[in-house]
Image (spheres, rainbow, N blue to C red):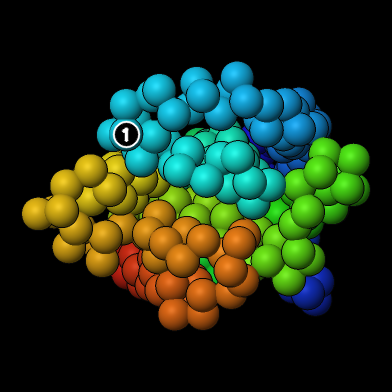
Amino acid sequence: MTAVVLAPARHAPIPVLRRWLADGWRGLAGWSVGIASVVLVYLPLYPSMKSPELIGLMDSLPPELVRTLGYENITTGSGYAQATFFGLIGLVLITMAGISCGAEFTGGAEESGRLELTLAHGVGRLQYALESSAALLLKLLVLGAVAFLVISAIDRPSELELEVVNLTAVTMAWVGLGLLAATAAFAAGALTGRRSWAVGVGAAVAVSGYGLQAVANNSEDLDWLRAASPFEWAYGQAPLANGFDWSGLGLVWAASVLFIVIGSAALSRRDIVG
């Protein structure tokens, strides 16, 4: 990501937010192209999933594997889009994008000395944290908009038959999961001042959320693990098929806010080492 160094801008509004967005547009464009490409490669293949041969192949797979991958309803348009994009490849992409930004905004900026220089130019620590969080949110919302628009455009040709409201619901859940991992990285970077720790914590949050639900799907005795899985909070009620699950969506976004609070508090209290 491009280096961010803020010149004195006493009268400029939201200088940190503006600089992160201005200097990060190339990376955002790259992630947008990647997400659009994945949508265009995978979702138009859905009509072929309705062939008797592929249905038979899916029936022959081990039930544990099917449940782990979320392929139970892959022969429906919503189930296919969920399993291939929102629950797998698309989720990996938005998580990687979010963690990369979240880690750079705190741990990466501190390691390079840019954070110390920015603060020396009259930007308050809390201001830096909140504006960086806003930039993180805006970037992920842009990726959500890209996915929503591209999927909407190919919905009819791909015979997915997705409802607009349901597509909106799953997109918000998808962005929320990306934001959760991103804000976890943001908070870890603020707490430690190290980009590697930030990336590791963000990845751990993402992987553990997926893993907890996968384990719960394959063990009735461990079904209680669902309650601790952000992946379950976001997708447990199948928003692409059934619409908004406000309680689950609220948990995902509330957890992200909590990580932002933790990161902001850490930056406000800890010594910054350039």
Which part of the image, by quadrant, shows the C terminus?
A: top left
Q: What residue is pinned by disc 1? A: 63
In the depicted structure, whether residue 85 falls above or below residue 185: above
Q: Position of residue 268 (x, y in %)?
A: 39, 70
Asked if residue 36 lies left or right of residue 100, the reply is: right
Q: Residue at x 42, y 62 (%)?
A: 236
Q: Residue at x 81, y 71 (%)?
A: 12
Residue 98 appearing in the image: no
Looking at the image, which is closer to me, 84 or 103? 84
Asked if residue 60 lies left or right of residue 133, the reply is: left
Q: Residues within 10 Å of mark 1 (few under 14, many from 20)?
A: some
Residue 140 found in image quarter: bottom right
In the depicted structure, whether residue 113 falls above or below residue 213: above
Residue 184 found in image quarter: bottom left
Looking at the image, which is closer to me, 57 or 180? 57
Q: Position of residue 137 (x, y in %)?
A: 63, 62
Asked if residue 69 lies left or right of residue 38, the reply is: left
Q: Residue at x 62, y 25 (%)?
A: 52
- Secondary structure found at label 1: helix
Looking at the image, which is closer to me, 104 or 33? 33
Residue 198 found in image quarter: top left
Q: How many marks?
A: 1
Q: Position of residue 187 (x, y in %)?
A: 38, 58
In the depicted structure, whether residue 107 falls above or below residue 19: above
Q: Amino acid at mark 1?
A: Pro
